[in-house]
Image (spheres, helix red, strand yellow):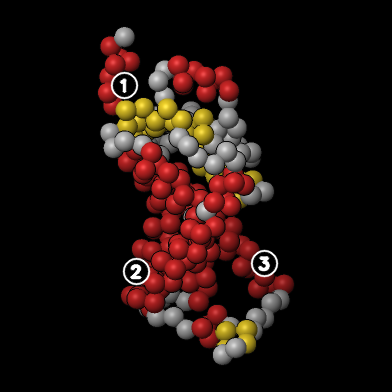
Amino acid sequence: MKIKNELPKNNINKHNELLEQGWIPLKEPSSVFLATVFSIPLMIINMMITLGALYLASGLSFNEFGIHGHSFTITINLLSLLYFLFLIFILVVVHEGIHLLCVPKFLKSKKTYAGLTFFGGYVYTEEELTKKRFLLITLAPFVILSILTPFMLGFLGVMNSTLKILAIINAAASSVDVLGAIIITFQVPKRATMVNNGIKSYWKSEKTVKWDMKK
């Protein structure tokens, strides 16, 4: 695994090489910005799912978020702001850490990268993985941090307002991941292998892989 502080870039030479080897590029947004724009509706859906999980496990009250009737109250001081930003940083690290833990043998991999940028954290691998593994890597942080954790902590009675807000923020931040999972689900066959080149993803069916091995 390698640490980088810049987003992965597409390699045109590798792109051409992958096409020659029979890899099929996914039809997906051409930039992180476009992916974010297209995922805005999913932000709302994700947050609604998390709000539902919170409501079922521990209940929800507008008062705990500073909403009283038709008014909204929020008190901010420097110390509380710094504390909340620290919690956001921890959330980013945990979110990306879950992505990373889902990559097989990530510590020994020379094609797996992790880092922090101005736009947040990221985990990226160029290892060839199955469709199921790609979906696991993509969806795990959302499912664990914004659905399962609120359920468990809610039933234990330790889900406070701060943790609820963090779960909702993670749900919104996971919208690009969910968009990626939807694209993979509908474009990639069940028994297929996938690989990344920068922000572009490619797939090759099991039959094609076996044909290549016989050549």
Q: How many marks?
A: 3
**How far, Cα to Cα, is label 3 from label 1?**
53 Å
Q: Residue at x 36, y 63 (%)?
A: 148
Q: To which residue does mark 1 refer?
A: 208
For the C terminus, the image quarter is top left
At horizontal 58% and vertical 35% (from top left) the residue drawn is 8
Residue farthest to the right, as pictured: 78
Q: Which residue is mark 2?
A: 152
| Secondary structure found at label 3 | helix
Q: Nearer the viewer, residue 68 or 98?
A: 68
Q: Is residue 127 left or right of residue 72?
A: left
Label 1 CA crowd tier, 10 Å (few <14, some 14–19, many 20+): some
Q: Residue tagged by mark 3?
A: 82
CA separation in Å, label 2 and label 1: 43 Å
Nearer the viewer's eye, disc 3 or disc 2? 2
Q: Residues within 10 Å of mark 3 (few under 14, many from 20)?
A: few
User: Percent x, y for residue 192?
Assistant: 32, 32
Q: Nearer the viewer, mark 2 or mark 1?
A: 1
Looking at the image, residue 137 lies above or below residue 162 = above
Rendered image: mark on residue 36: none
Q: Amino acid at mark 1?
A: Thr
